[in-house]
Amino acid sequence: RCIHALKVLDRYAQFSAQSVDAVARRLGMARSRFDVVLSGSINAGIPELQQAIARRVKGFNPRAAVRPARYKPVRGALVYAAHLAWGGLPKGVLAGEILRYGDPR
């Protein structure tokens, strides 16, 4: 069973890296330095998957920096909605730990 799970994660990592490569090529960034930020519960919650994706992305573009997101995607949606509705939020409103992934370091 474990072997099958590892194969699934590896295929996911390969697909993710191929997607990053396709977007980088399309945007003319294939040889540039850029960040790949992994978010979502699967990407941010499985360190082994993060490492596998980073290895695969580096295979396509050694200058890419792969890292987990600090904040959950909903944080960005809240900031954007508040900007549209009220022109923004008071400083510190979104500093709560509930909007962060795991250990904020």
Image: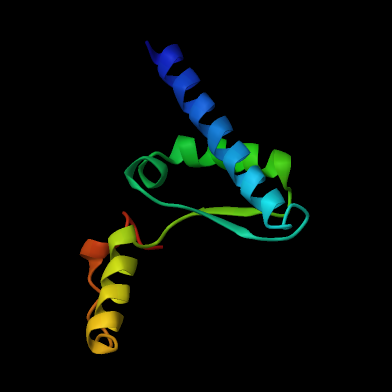
From this viewpoint, which residue is outermost toward the top?
1
- At which x and y percent is residue 52? 55, 35
Q: Is residue 49 toward the left or the right of residue 23 in the image?
A: left
**Scheme of colours in the image:** rainbow
When the figure is inspected, residue 65 is found, relative to residue 93, above or below; the finding is above
When the figure is inspected, residue 59 is found, relative to residue 97, above or below; the finding is above
- At which x and y percent is residue 19? 58, 41
When the figure is inspected, residue 8 is found, relative to residue 104, above or below; the finding is above
- At which x and y percent is residue 85? 23, 83
When the figure is inspected, residue 26 is found, relative to residue 49, above or below; the finding is below
Q: Is residue 69 toward the left or the right of residue 85 in the image?
A: right
Q: Quadrant of the C terminus?
A: bottom left
Residue closer to the observer: 29 or 26? 26
**Total tally of numbered discs in the picture:** 0
Point 62% across, 49% down: residue: 23
Residue 72 shows up from this direction: no
Quarter of the figure with residue 34: bottom right
Point 37% across, 10% down: residue: 1
Q: Is residue 94 toward the left or the right of residue 37 in the image?
A: left
Point 40% across, 51% down: residue: 39
Quarter of the figure with residue 77: bottom left
- At which x and y percent is residue 18? 62, 37
Residue 98 shows up from this direction: yes
Residue closer to the observer: 48 or 32? 32
Point 49% across, 42% down: residue: 50
